[in-house]
Amino acid sequence: MAGAIALVEPPPYRPHDVAAPTPRAPAPFDLEEVTIAQLQDGMSSGKYTARSIAEQYLARIDEIDRHGPTVNSVIELNPDALDIADALDRERKEKGVRGPLHGVPVLIKDNIDTADKMRTSAGSLALADAVAPRDAFIVQRLRAAGAVILGKTNLSEWANFRSTHSISGWSGRGGQTRNPYTLDRNPCGSSSGTGAGIAANLAAIGVGTETDGSIVCPSSANGLVGIKPTVGLVSRAGIVPISHTQDTAGPMARTVTDATILLGALAGIDPADKATRPSSNKWHADYREFLKPDGLRGARIGVARNFFGFNPTVDHIMDESIAAMKNAGAAIIDPANLATKGKFDDAEFDVLLYEFKAGVNAYLAKSNATPKTLAVLIEFDEQNRDREMPHFGQEIFEMAQKKGPLTSSGYRSALAKCRRLSRREGIDAVLKKHRLDAFIAPTGGPAWVIDYLNGDHFTGGSSTPAAVAGYASITVPAGLIHELPVGLSFVGGPWSEPTLIRLAFGFERVMPVRKPPKFLPTYTA
């Protein structure tokens, strides 16, 4: 029986396991591509229970993630998941339903604190035994909404902020996550496990985190909808940090509707995170009111052409998408370029170095982890080089360690430059000039081959302006290139989630292109 599956750690990582296996075809799965609404209908009718749903997903993880294609997206399962599901089933019978997430399984990234039997490691062996002293605020929100936290997902170690030659989807603790569409391809990072796991139907919905691209890139590369909220809409308390000016958690799901439901559960003011205070009167407990079938009609959408050109097939998909939006009643302003594109990349990296050192030292000081400082983490990695650094080093850690405090003039200058060029002279300027609801750009290209010698091969993308500004963006599946998904991003101003949800839902209605993965071993022409 599915309920008897052992909740065990994934097998030890083997340094040469990048070669994709030749998988057998996965067995038919009753919950494939199922939505939150369909799960709720099934639980209401008696077809499903929260326990039976959780059992089916656990069986799917065993078949697809642990064995078979070996996607390796789930770093740890929650040993209490079935007990939580049983309790929610009893509550449904005795008291009714809490809301749309009652009994719905969710996977969360392994840099989000859970005060239970699971660890919070950021993928690092240095934190492999660390159990958080308290739930992250968003975990409290998920539990209150009745979600079943099924487990934690692998990630690019330290959210891809350890090395300049990193391999997305690889961590010392979790090994390499594969892209379920083509198994020798990268799932993108750093929310790689959430992207691959939700794409492979290992849970209904997932939570990722982003500093710059870490929700939208794995969503694009795995055929998902990803919402990168305005910084401050969702609490960062209890999440392993990189940058207090750019970090945010956000939903990753197979449909705009499911991502929207999850956003409502995550958003809210947290007394422990002062960045959430400005969201008062701006966040919504339920964003479904913005799901308009004709959401594109009358919208003014700009095309940021200066993010195009890195892949001709991606450009073709974008042009098909633009034509579909125009046919659906949107006014397309083309081009509507970002004048400051690429002008603040160095300043952004400088800001991240300063903020990472300050943030990770503060997080570790309050954690149950043994290392209490970035300096000790660097020392741990050196002492465990064969396991932690078999493919790439920790240059970013070392650069961050050399930085001074957040009172440094270098930090203040870099931050001011980032805010000016990303906001006033960047996104704000293009939205105002063309009177736009949002602008669009390709989220990224098709997934690259996992490469342990050279690291990642990013070809292009559009995540940086919204990330640096702290503004909202949403990526939606736009097409496939040789069975590899690519996404289109809608980018707006601060607190523009309602508008972006309306546009994304309208786009999904006219471009329903998502297809479940086939677990191909490699690309063949």
Image (cartoon, helix red, strand yellow):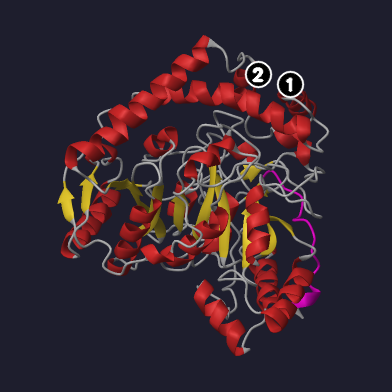
Q: Nearer the viewer, residue 211 or 502?
A: 502
Viewport quadrant of the C terminus: bottom left
Q: Residue at x 40, y 35 (%)?
A: 464
- Taking the magenta stretch, the answer to whether it contains residue 438 is no
Q: Position of residue 271 (x, y in %)?
A: 63, 42
Q: Position of residue 312 (x, y in %)?
A: 26, 47
Q: Position of residue 515 (x, y in %)?
A: 42, 68
Range shown magenta: 2-17
Judge from the rendering whether residue 233 lies leftward or rightward of residue 135; answer left or right. left
Q: Amino acid at mark 1?
A: Ala
Judge from the rendering whether residue 473 lies leftward or rightward of residue 349; answer left or right. left
Badge 2: how crowded within 10 Å, few (<14), some, or many (20+)? some
Badge 1: how crowded within 10 Å, few (<14), some, or many (20+)? some
The image quarter containing residue 225 is bottom left
The image quarter containing residue 202 is bottom right
**Which of disc 2 and disc 1 is earlier in sequence?**
1
Q: Which mark is residue 375?
A: 1
Q: Nearer the viewer, residue 59 or 496?
A: 496
Q: Nearer the viewer, residue 432 or 41?
A: 432
Residue 412, above or below 460: above
- Taking the magenta stretch, the answer to whether it contains residue 10 is yes
Secondary structure beneath dot 1 equals: helix
Q: Amino acid at mark 2?
A: Gln
Judge from the rendering whether residue 38 lies leftward or rightward of residue 367; answer left or right. left
Q: Residue at x 81, y 75 (%)?
A: 4
The answer to whether any part of residue 470 appears in the image is yes
Residue 501, above or below 33: above
Secondary structure beneath dot 2 equals: helix
Residue corresponding to mark 2: 401
Q: Which mark is residue 330?
A: none
Q: Position of residue 447 (x, y in %)?
A: 45, 49
